[in-house]
Amino acid sequence: MTIAFISHADCTLHETTSYHPDTAERLAAIHDRLIASGLEMIMHFYDAPMVSVEQLCRVHDADYVSEIFQKLQDNERVWLDADTLMVSASLTAAQRGAGAVVKAVDLVMSQDANSAFCCVRPPGHHAEHNKAMGFCIFNNVAVGVAHAIAQYGLERVAIIDFDAHHGNGTEDIFRGNEQVLLCSSFQHPFYPDTGVPGKHDNMINIGLAAGTSGEQFRQLVEQQWLPELETFQPELIFISAGFDGHREDDMSDLDLVEEDFAWVTREVKKIADNYAQGRIVSTLEGGYVMSALGRSVASHIDALL
């Protein structure tokens, strides 16, 4: 199995504050763990390209994209919301983040890779069609999904989001889109106070109570996601891979461990092998405790093999 690893040094230059959870050290922790685990030796590494305005505007309002591109003309630092900071290097990092997912789609669709992991920041799944939010400027996974549909004519694309926080931006962009099945799990109630548990048109939302164990998480995935994915028969699967549900991460109150992330990845891979020629594109979302993040990403990538 060929796994593409897509990242860029520019993603480390998106500097936040000393107290902000999304730091460049997150990417370093992942790289260090991949070296220690030996996984680095079996992956193919690619630089993330810059996303185009056309690709962004498939999922974001043109006025919003234009506003983001002009934000720093008169200021060195701009808070887009209470949690989302832009500095001089942030726009380039965000363009690389979305561009990485576009590149990943091209690699798996051309069969140059069976699957891909995008090791990028800022994350994306909170960014709505016209609003930055929750550390996110552009919705990386949504840009990739729209590219897959527009460029390759795919009719059924699934998104798996197991970040501890509801991916309100991805839901905002694809709500009611019959070409997309969105399967999300998230602590509920919790930030960003969106997401209604249950099945709603093309969305399968699993609300997880504080303290949810790995066993409980797995049972809910088996009951609610897997049958819907079997019925949908996706041609390509995306994963918004957030690891802040780890028991060591204080950004949530869930009780998951790296083997739970590996398990759900293996289950998703079975679906991909059956219906999508094994094609999976995964992109980093949350995960803010360095040791737990590194171990979780390594387990996730290993499960893609």
Image (cartoon, rainbow, N blue to C red):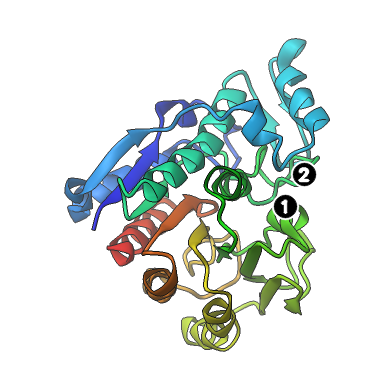
Q: Which residue corresponds to the image point at 60% horizontal and 40% vertical from the top-left?
A: 19
Dot 2, crowdedness within 10 Å: few (<14), some or many (≥20)? many
- Dots 1 and 2: beta carbons under 8 Å? yes
SS of the residue at dot 1?
helix
Using the rendered view, name the quadrant where residue 199 is placed. bottom right
User: What is the x, y in percent for residue 60?
Assistant: 74, 39
Q: From the image, tell me which residue sits under label 2.
A: 129
User: What is the x, y in percent for residue 229?
Assistant: 55, 76
Q: Nearer the viewer, residue 12 or 104?
A: 104
Q: Which mark is residue 57?
A: none
Q: Quadrant of the C terminus?
A: bottom left
Q: Is residue 260 left or right of residue 15?
A: left
| Distance between mark 1 and mark 2 Cα atoms | 7 Å
Q: Nearer the viewer, residue 170 or 175?
A: 175
Q: Is residue 6 above or below residue 291?
A: above
Q: Is residue 51 above or below residue 129?
A: above
User: What is the x, y in percent for residue 207?
Assistant: 68, 77
Mark 1: amino acid: Gly
Q: Is residue 6 left or right of residue 102?
A: left
Q: From the image, tell me which residue sits under label 1.
A: 169
Q: Nearer the viewer, residue 109 or 304?
A: 109
Q: Is residue 111 visible?
A: yes
Mark 2: amino acid: His
